[in-house]
Image (spheres, rainbow, N blue to C red):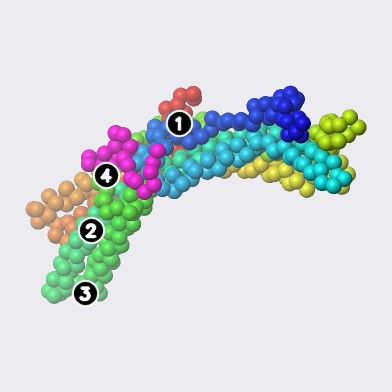
Amino acid sequence: MSVFKYFFSLKKILILQIVFLAGCSVHSIHDSSYISDSIHSRTGHALNLTKEKEVFELPDGVSLDDGLTGEEAVAIALWNNAQFQADIMEIGFARADLIEAGLLRNPVFSLLFPLGPKQLEATLNLPLEFFWQRPKRVAAAKLNVERVADNLVQHGLNLTRDVMIAYAELILTRERSRIVAEEAILRSEIAAIASARLKVGDISELEETAFRLEAARTQEASIRFARDVKLAEERLKTLLGLGMTEVTLELSLIPVSFEQGLDSSKLLNTAFAARPDLRAAELEIEAAGHRLGWERSKIFNLTGMLDANGEGKEGFEMGPGMQLELPVLNWNNGKILRAQTELEQAARQYVAVRHRIAREVMEAYTNYLAAQQALKILRVDILPSAQTATENAQGAYSIGEISYLEFLDFKRSLLDSLLREAEAVAELRRAEAFLKHSIGFTPMKTVNDGI
């Protein structure tokens, strides 16, 4: 009777194979859909999980024809950003590691042929250490998949913050370029008047040179700010996935909002509860603990054996046995120490992440309040006063009370105030982006209500 027939007809072997096969399947809910859902719950925008390479697509409900809002910019970036699309592939590697962690070593079948006086011998070795090693290995791999998924959610939130900041920068550079271009024209006109006054002896050559120098400096600044507009637009287009196109972005501006009643302690508690990177740090501690248990379980490696002889005392013989690796010389000390160090490092890294989040929240909170206050002062006091002064100066010039040069100086002061307002608005937009990012893009109303 064939040795193979004996081996593969035994009920015990079949039962063991079924147990092996049943235990080899592992699963995790943390995939690209989980990442998309998590980002959508925080930002209101989902990911394109079926995107083809180098194909730009607009999300549903987004159009560039009526101007690009900040929210639409975020939606487009999450849908098309090339680097983020590449980063999401990391979840595939983690899930592959999970599958690998759930696999069992194949049985080893050895056969010695009966040549000459040698009898037929066969051995089937079945690794049995999976009973105590595999659960720890799989648990660590599952936690790693969840950690990678949460880190990728954080990457999406980082991208959202970067888009909001780039959008604010483009608004600022365009407004600044427009205002400085107007100021350059104004300075040139002032320089021309100064040159005419020099000819009639009203001012000295030194005074005329100062006016001409100021006009040249403003003209040079106008050129630099026009360049900054192009650079800012390219940065935003790259984040949106439009970096290789010649599209000119038309913006549809929405007035900045003023969140009221913010409480730093509520913001901090919200951040600790909502930040994906903090959750990822927690999962790393758990995963490190499971890896430590796995390394300790490797001290004992047991192999089940089934031995068969072709010609024994009673003809064909077969019997079970085992092979135990004796932990005499190697107690896996090096890998155990490494796993212990990884666990301690993960615990300390968790503390470091909490400290970093606390700092980010407090900095964002402080900057946001300061930006609010600065913009309010500009809009309530400085800008209205400059506008009123310019209007009065225009009236005074029309009746001959002041010279045209003095009137132009009032207009220049108004342009300076408008530039400061544009910078203050951009600063508030940036501060809002950092504040929302620092608390995991949890809705502000939810934070204020203490939910």
Mark 3 burial class by Cα count in 10 Å: few <14, some 14-19, many 20+: few
Residue under the image location 29 percent in, 33 percent down: 61
Determine whether label 4 and label 1 are within 8 Å by CB: no
Determine whether label 2 and label 3 are within 8 Å by CB: no
Residue type at numbered disc 2: Ala
User: Toward which corner of the image does residue 28 lie, by quadrant?
Assistant: top right
Q: Which residue is mark 2?
A: 181
Residue type at numbered disc 4: Leu
Q: CA distance from mark 4 to mark 1?
A: 28 Å
Q: Nearer the viewer, mark 1 or mark 2?
A: 1
Magenta-colored stretch includes residue 244: no
Q: Is residue 370 visible?
A: no
Residue 54 location (% of width, % of height)? 36, 48
Q: Which residue in the rendered view is the most extreme toward the right?
A: 313
Magenta stretch, main secondary structure, is loop
Disc 1 or 3, which lies upstream in sequence? 1
Q: Which residue is mark 4?
A: 251
Residue 239 location (% of width, % of height)? 38, 48
Disc 1 or 2, which lies upstream in sequence? 1
Q: Secondary structure at mark 3?
A: loop
Magenta-colored stretch includes residue 66: yes
**What stretch of residues is rendered in magenta?**
50-74
Q: Which residue is mark 1?
A: 37
Residue under the image location 88 percent in, 34 percent down: 312
